[in-house]
Image (cartoon, rainbow, N blue to C red):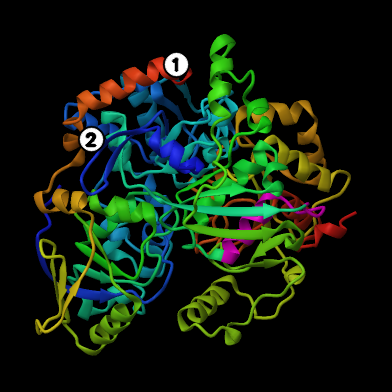
Amino acid sequence: MPQTLYDKLWANHVVHVEDDGTALLYIDRHLVHEVTSPQAFEGLRLAGRKPWRIDSVVATADHNTPTTDWSEGIKDPISRLQVETLDANIRQYGAKAYFPFLDQRQGIVHVIGPEQGATLPGMTVVCGDSHTSTHGAFACLAHGIGTSEVEHVLATQCLVQKKMQNMLVTVDGPLARGVTAKDIALVIIGRIGTAGGTGCAVEFAGSSIRALSMEGRMTLCNMAIEAGARAGMVAVDEVTVAYLKGRPFAPTGENWNRAVAHWRTLVSDTGAQFDRVVRLDARDIRPQVTWGTSPEMVVAVDERVPDPDKEKDPTRREGMERALIYMNLKPNTRIEDIRLDKVFIGSCTNSRIEDLRAAAAMVRGKRVASNIRLALVVPGSGLVKAQAEQEGLDRVFRDSGFEWREPGCSMCLAMNADRLEPGERCASTSNRNFEGRQGAGGRTHLVSPEMAAAAAIAGHFVDIRSWR
Amino acid sequence: MEKFTLLNGLVAPLDRANVDTDAIIPKQFLKSIKRSGFGPNLFDAWRYQDVGEPGMDNARRPLNPDFVLNQPRYKGASILLARKNFGCGSSREHAPWALADYGFRAVIAPSFADIFYNNCFKNGLLPIVLSELRIDHLFNEVNAFPGYKLTVDLERQMVITPDGATQIAFEVDAHRKFCLLNGFDDIGLSLRQADKIRAFEARRRIEQPWLFG
């Protein structure tokens, strides 16, 4: 019977199945960061258990690390303790690789996994972080887990899982100038809603997806969780193989040839059955801007803030009204008339070299608008930062009035000092616009790096399809 | 893990859809390296009038009188009645830790986000899916009758109304039910398959050695 990519990944990792279909699924790669792991290591210690296969672990500190003054260390004592706890746990138990605070290869866990070649096609990849779906861009079964499951994977190298449903999202046709993987992701979420993919593993396919770089595919899979799908994935093709060649942890020699031959089988078979199918035409996709407090509250940049009075569903209407109050927006406001206070370019969604290049191209030779209090560029990793500096992108950003920072999660979730003050409005390349996400009382609009960069220059959203 | 068998508890209604885990427990409280103590900061941004930070004396913070859990009639609630897509967003297990630490033992909603749903079972917190129609009805009942209590019988997979007249069946995976009823931590159960895991791993090392480089 023809199989989907997810069917194959699932079947390749089942160790044991119970009568009710609950399976033990083998885990190849366990990514670890400082926020969701301390209690798991502690649990392991309390139970007197040892890690099953510690060389599956790749770890870094990213959520709490500051993006300024690295020479001064981590000033917040609670953040520092959490990072030092990870240091101590890795010292005690080991890891395949650890990129601690201050290491040049440190960075956002979902940026450094692929960058190091620690994420390989056909793997199961887990991390105590919902944006683990990012790694599905490499035809992995990759998803976020809770801390109890982090402990479970440490102790058993397996997860207790039930098979999800198969969902296919196809996007076909050429993307217009100024339309990016981020816009595809937001359009999909707007279409199916933040629970549209609940219970599903989503495969993204179609000519528009094939045309995306690995960076673009990672952006798309990263946002699968915002559509409720724990796992998003893209089949292997030449783009995947070319990206991995020569990465530090990628196989070499005869193993490389064997691996590539296996990876090429990681595609959905012709005639494979999906439980749900959603089809989009890329020609309909315009640059997107979220207006509310959920990623599904999204419109195109040339549209207006919607009017709750026109919404028939009472629960949705109430949610819209609440969101408009929180966002301090009036129905029918033109998106381009929304003025901003801050701009954040970064996060596991959009902090890779391609994102920074695209944003830099928008701002070269221009100045950040006077109403923008802070425009921030936070590279996804030390290596992304070094690459960008080699290309002179840091100068471009700095000359335009952006701050060029050290790598980390930063203002995506504001666990470090980078945050919105109450009432501040931000154009952000991150993934969540929930109430308080970027700081208590902060107002987040999710956009692509190009849209964020242009908004910083204009001081308000602009339709970058006509940006000069 | 604490066993879950039979629960008779006061119901608190949280009438909004898509409650995300950032709302359940805001990020600043994720800096803790412990599993306990999150209850006072459950729904922190909605519950208090000031901005909460770790280390504050929560007993002295100004409460938001409009937030439902601050109403005296819901004090001591152990069942949270919620709307669809409860627990969406981040994978933080701090969300169920905060709910359980506050005193909730069950959450009833029309749907849950996958990771949150899964995390609940690891912490003796039972997420129960009922139809939108049932949930609407329960919201009406809870609002109408102060002190409204429900009984949750996990063994029989039933939610029972106060008069005992209505018994509403719910679904739960056999494996998860077994673990909850017995208070089993599933690491111990999984390690019973250690031989199978070892055999699987040995085969994989031969077939795909690059995964073990």
Q: Chain of mark 1?
A: B
For the image, the number of numbered tags is 2
Counting from the top left corner in percent of width and height, residue B191 is at 19, 31
Which image quadrant for residue A192? bottom right
Amino acid type, residue under disc 1 in the picture: Pro
Can I make out residue A106 in this image?
A: no
Residue drawn at 45 percent across, 56 percent down: B89
Label 1 near label 2: C-beta < 8 Å?
no
Counting from the top left corner in percent of width and height, residue A71 is at 57, 27
Relative placement, left or right, of A108 versus A392 is: left
Label 2 crowd (10 A; few <14 / some 14-19 / many >=20): some
Extent of the magenta region: A174-191
Q: Which residue lies under the disc numbered 1?
A: B209
* Alpha carbons under labels 2 and 1: distance apart: 31 Å
Q: Which residue lies under the disc numbered 2?
A: A43
**Is residue A65 depicted above or below A163 in this figure?**
above
Which image quadrant for residue A179? bottom right
Residue drawn at 28 percent across, 84 percent down: B137
**Is residue A205 depicted above or below A421 in this figure?**
above
- The prevailing secondary structure element of the residues shown in magenta is helix
Closer to us: mark 2 or mark 1?
1
Counting from the top left corner in percent of width and height, residue A230 is at 45, 49
